Image (tube, rainbow, N blue to C red):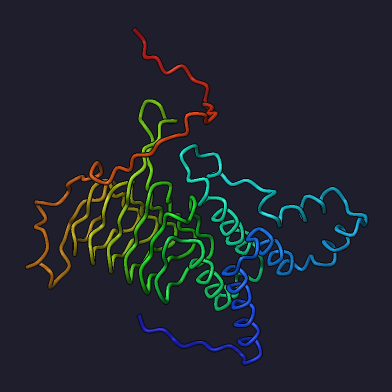
Amino acid sequence: MTKRHVSLPEEAEAGMREFVAEVDERLSSDEDTCSVVEDVLIDLSGDREAYDRWQAGGSVSTAERVRLQSYDPCHTTLESEYYAEKDEEKFRRSKHLQWLWRQFDSLPIADNVEFALRFRRMLADHLFEECGDNCRFFKGISFTYGHNITIGDNTVVHDDAHLDDRGKLTIGDRVSVSDGVHVYSHDHDVVDQTSVRNFHTIIEDDVRLTYDSMVRAGNKVGENAIVGARGIVQHDIPAHHIAVGMPAKSVKIKPGWESVATPIEDAGVNRQEQRHLEYDLDADLEVFDEFQRDLEPPN
């Protein structure tokens, strides 16, 4: 698609560049990540006066105190914090960065596309296992942890996509992830939904995952393939194929790629088990069943 180049006024550009570089430098230093996140959110939210008043022992309402405390990610919880198999050491840092990403997106300034793209791109370098050059991340993207995600160069992830990295998620170069796409790397047992299996899910180079599509855990979408709008991927999609439907099935090979692509009739192979990731739980871990159900089948 042909797009226009957009430039900002020089003063706005300079301020934006300076702020992103300052946060990047602080996150790259030995400074406590929790403190950096707290400072950034307080200042972007315009709450510095109220925060300083509170810290000095001044009067704040109960609602103000809750709001001011929540800028510190150490005073918050995320859904993924409850997952028994998570890597505690990695999560201690990724939680703070994910909180910064999520709270930034809730601020009015996140609608400033040029600034927001640069800020999220900088955060991705610190949050993800690896992030390539020139990636663009739009508003409302969510993750499980962030630290199990690898993304290549020139990839774009649009609004409200969910990148589940409870297992492991690899996304290649020049991938387009459209609005509302969900890519999963974990699955639940059909009888006991508290039993979770993690997988490595792979989206190869030049893939397009179009609007509202979903890739189930452990599947691979091959190079240069397309998953049509609201398609549900339940098995591997071969390179250069166009797959549509629920479940998504290969209906066509991209014109010009027929000689190198897997024939349509040979598509539809599920290799999920090859990408299953084992994990161990600590022997002294205190676990609980949030559903408290009796799963014994009738006699």
Q: Quadrant of the C terminus?
A: top left
Image position of 93 (left or right of 262): right
Q: In which quarter of the image is the N terminus?
A: bottom left
Residue at point 36%, 38% (across, down):
197
Residue that lies at the very extreme toward the bottom in this rendered image: 10
**Whole-percent x and y of residue 164?**
43, 51
Q: In which quarter of the image is residue 190?
A: top left
Compared with 193, 24 (above or below) is: below
* Total numbered circles: 0
Residue at point 44%, 30% (across, down):
194
Residue that lies at the very extreme toward the front in this rendered image: 30
Compared with 292, 244 (above or below) is: below
**Whole-percent x and y of residue 121?**
50, 71
Residue that lies at the very extreme toward the left in this rendered image: 259
Residue at point 53%, 50% (across, down):
91
**Whole-percent x and y of residue 46?**
77, 68
Q: Quadrant of residue 195?
A: top left
**Whole-percent x and y of residue 104?**
62, 64
Judge by depth and name the residue closer to the eye, 16 or 228: 16
Judge by depth and name the residue closer to the eye, 8 or 25: 25
Judge by depth and name the residue closer to the eye, 244 or 60: 60
Compared with 298, 222 (above or below) is: below
